[in-house]
Amino acid sequence: QVQLVESGGGLVQPGGSLRLSCEGSGFTFRDYAVTWYRQVPGKEREVIGFIKSGGDTDYSGSVKGRFTISRDIAKNTVYLQMTNLRPEDTAVYYCFSRGKWGQGTQVTVSS
């Protein structure tokens, strides 16, 4: 059964860092791209970046230079390293792969 589980969200002060994890089961990330999204209540889900099966990454302009996507194939986990966080980064963060969504993890950036 294909499943994605995010973790690592929480409350962080502006300028701080967090690392989110997206653990997959039922398939391997070596063969599939993973996209990270975020969503604020009342707004559409926004793509913030992805990692292709070959390992290439790309990011939206709003997070480029601050967020980094990486993966550990042995752990079948994709990471979203977020640095220099801003209040406007507050959202529920989701990973998506193979047509499946994770349950989301809340990130709140506030002093």
Image: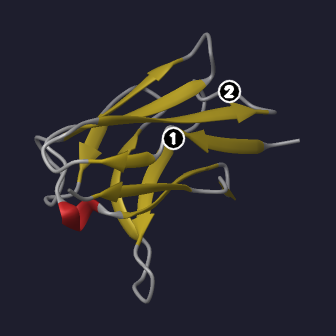
- Foreground residue, 108 or 25? 108
Residue shown at the point (64%, 32%) measured from the top left: 23
Whole-percent x, y for residue 41 in the image:
45, 82
| Residue 49 vertical position relative to residue 31 in the rendered view, above or below | below
- Give the residue furthest to the bottom: 42
Query: Which quadrant does the C terminus fall into?
Result: bottom left
- Give the residue furthest to the right: 1
Read off the residue under disc 1.
33
Left or right for 8, reference 104: left
Q: Are marks 2 and 1 in contact (CB under 8 Å)?
A: no
Whole-percent x, y for residue 57 in the image:
30, 37
Other residues around mark 1 within 10 Å, as few (<14) / some (14–19) / many (≥20):
some
Read off the residue under disc 2.
28
| Residue 7 vertical position relative to residue 95 in the rendered view, above or below | above
Secondary structure under the numbered disc 2 in the rendered image:
loop
- Foreground residue, 16 or 51? 16
Q: How is the image coloured?
A: secondary structure
Secondary structure under the numbered disc 1 in the rendered image:
loop
Other residues around mark 2 within 10 Å, as few (<14) / some (14–19) / many (≥20):
some
Left or right for 62, reference 73: left
Kind of residue at disc 2 = Thr
Residue shown at the point (25%, 59%) measured from the top left: 110
- Foreground residue, 35 or 43? 43
Whole-percent x, y for residue 19 in the image:
38, 33
Q: Which mark is residue 52?
A: none
